[in-house]
Image (cartoon, coloured by chain):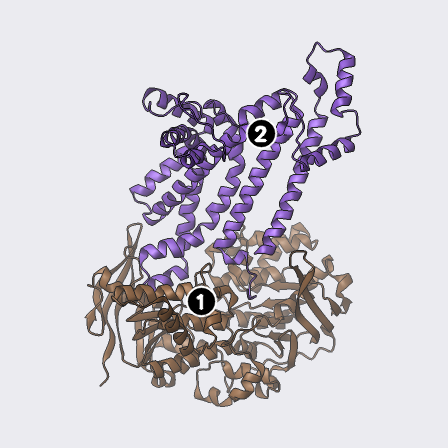
Chain colours: A brown, B purple
Amino acid sequence: MSSRILEVSGLDLSFTTYGQRTKVLHNLNFHLDAGERVSLIGQSGSGKTVTMRTIIGTLPMPPGKVENGSIQYEGQELLTLSRKQRNRLKGTGISIVLQDPLLSFNPVLTIHRQMDDIVRYADMRNNKTRSRTDRRSHIIDTLKKVQLSDGEHILGSYPMQLSGGMRQRVLIGMSLLNNPRLLIADEPGTALDVTTQQEILNLLNTLVSEEGLTLLLITHNLGVVREMADRVYVMQKGRIVEQGIKDEIFASPKHPYTLELMNSVLPLYGDKVMDVADTHHEENAIEIRGVNKIFSRKIGIFRRKTEINHAVKEVSLDIGRGDIFGIAGESGSGKTTLAKIFLGLHKPSSGEVAIDNQNLDEFHGSTEFRKTVQIVYQNPGSSLNPRRTVADQLKVPLKFTGFSPKHYHSRIEELLDMVELPRSYASMYPHELSGGQKQRVAIARALSCHPKILVLDEPTSALDVLIQNSVINLLHRLRDEFDLTYVFISHDLSLMRNFCNRVAIMFRGEICEQGRTRDIFANPQHPYTRALLSSIPVISVEEERLKPVVSKAERNAVLTTTTELTD
Amino acid sequence: MIAYLVRRTVALLLVLLGLVILIFIIARVVPGDPARIALGPLATADQVAEMRSEMGLDDPFLVQLWNYLTGLLQGDLGKSLLSSRPVMDDLVAALPATFELVLATIFLQISLSIPLGVLAAVYRDSWIDNITRIISLIGVVTPGFVLAIILQLLASYYLTFFPVTGRLDPGLEFSATKTGLLTIDSLLAGRGDVFVSACLHLFLPSIALAAAGIGQVMRITRSAMIEIGSRDFIEASRSYGIPEQVVTIRYMLRVASIAPLTILGLEFASLIGNAFIVEFVFSWPGIASYGVRTILQKDLNAVIGVVLVSGIFFVVANLVIDVLLGFIDPRNRIREGSRK
């Protein structure tokens, strides 16, 4: 029988704003035993983060108020502790790893300063004295635990000088500095690329077994949960609706909400995968021949030296009419630069681009070009003007493409019908709509002047999974109805598998592999594609079996690890 | 960092060169013959013509400009028409008083506005916040000269230990020879009585001058602190058990001070303008009375000298602020993703 680390029982919590009390946590019961990995699953707004902040003691009270219940850490009641005693536990008993590794660092202090403060003030609270050099060697030892061997260098750096994966490692190192027993991780790695995310998850697993940590994992990503947790609690609207051993929950979810969450995860392999058929058009919508894009900027006192970033290298692509062509790649792979090139926003340094059989050089900037290519952006919250009504926003492209003002009204109604929004929404402002509805407006705006090609830049990544699927279905329907060509830019390969009929994988500015989605996923050739696919967390054993298996050596050959500094 | 400084200094010199040329042109195109003004209404046409050629006013414009610029490089700003002394000497005599006043003002602004702004943010919506809010409102809406007059009246009737004019009690024998700043020179000379007197004389004018900036910078500090306080990294520092005071000063203020410092740099521009008026009210023997007199009399060389001095002050002060910002925020020094 292992000892109990944390026990939350009957926890009720409310917020009071402007005299109005809202209950956000309802009778929460859960526990963690020593060495366990427990996951709290739920969508945004389910109360996961509030729960985390209540445990660690950083939730501002008021407006927050614990109405009932208790939180016990190693048998000690936390809620009745004095502020001082409570602070003593921070970082030493319970520690956290926040979601975004960049935002979790103070941008103006060196890593050493930030880590040293954590050790120094913990020492003060515990009446220990260590010299500066002792503390430094302790910090460097801790960085070794998170597989960062070049501690000296890292300590002298500012957060922005480290890569995303390295920042996440340092962040985990920070939380381990004072040897906590319980580590709470909020969406670890989700802000990173999948290959890096997997490294981080492996690291956390190693730490739990080697350092004797207990892990509370807070996430919405079921794939991550499957790789990381022993037991799970499913949270919905401040209540725990289902709990149990991870394998049992994944094998047979009981609560309808759990079931809904499971079903909304897009399958990567297996029979649930949706294959997208080709449309058998002969001609190409976009032809790209040997395109390069080199960014350069001048540095130094006299601005003579030039720093060069070769963002797109010798890319050639044919995107057929009617295709849903996915361009996949991690951050910095050049996929967005490539998209900007055929939108006419960047001029390629060399190479030819033809859109709809016309040379882009002459074509772009004309009204005809605007009518041919349109874009839907990632975040509808920021791509729609908050001060103009839906109708006003839909009018803008009509105005610029010479549409007769007489037909504005009927066209707007037609567009809202197309994206399955009620016609009355024309007079609403963006803030009155939900995220999914806003994205529908953005799609309607892009379609308003009958384009032939639509560029979709991560159109669903700002949306919750459940809504994401309905937007994808809408896009599929629209393509069939209006004979559209989509260029879909994303890092989400599971989505790409179910949405595109052809894909190209970009890696450091080059296209390393392209072809029919089905073939690429079934039989990836390029080592990078294989590494990428193998890193995606999936939710069933069956999918796990179908994923390409990549050895460590193979992986390291294409991916730079995040444990070493690179220039 | 050194490359950055060199670049900024070169840019600074170019700005000053542009400023000199601009002022020089403006001074030449406004109506009124400087030679006539210098000689007075009784001079004959011949005398004026002689004076014109002596002053070089008959030379082509570019030649005049060239002569002026080459003189400038040797520290020669020409002669003042009114005092018949080199402008440089007049400036050197008047500058320290103004410089001392402006330094005292900046000191007051920084030492009052930032701490009060931090307090207002930490005790948000409490009585402290409300009081600082009222102070800053009053400071921002009251023009410097109105405040100067009010303070002067208060000092004459109630706070009589505050002198209302000049830099020093008339009875004190002291001449500031080292830096020209009475406060510093008196300390160097070990004259406590002079130091106290100089500080008392400085107090009211610098308050009148600093009020607007204090109000503005205080509010900006407050909102920057509140904004930074909601960032993830602050939550992280708290969760790692770093004491609240350390979080506030080292983790929040350091990031939050970027906006108020930038504003402070801009504030310097209005500081010089306001100093002209405040100096007048308090009979401060600084550059203001000199500047106003020369402008009214169209004493060209002196006007250019005064403008140049204010220009140098503004540009240098902003350079100092930028360097300070670079020191506070490594993002200004180091480019994203690259190593030192």
Q: Is residue A88 left or right of residue B16?
A: left
> Where is residue B141 drawn, in percent x and y?
44, 32
Question: Counting other residues with Cα less than 10 Å from the Cα at mark 1, is it few (<14), some (14-19), or many (20 or more)?
Answer: many
> Where is residue B326 drawn, in percent x and y?
52, 53
> Where is residue A456 drawn, in percent x and y?
60, 68
Q: Is residue A457 visible?
A: yes
Q: Residue at x 41, y 30 (%)?
A: B198
Residue that carries the numbered disc 1 in the rendered image: A100
Residue A254 vs residue B139, the one in the foreground: B139
Q: CA distance from mark 1 to mark 2?
A: 57 Å
Task: Describe the element under mark 2 as helix, strand or loop.
Answer: helix
- Name the amino acid, label 1: Asp
The label number, if any, that marks residue B91 in the structure image? 2
Image quadrant in which the C terminus of chain A is located:
bottom right
Pointer 1 chain: A
Task: Describe the element under mark 1 as helix, strand or loop.
Answer: loop
Vertical arrangement, residue B27 with respect to residue A171, above or below? above
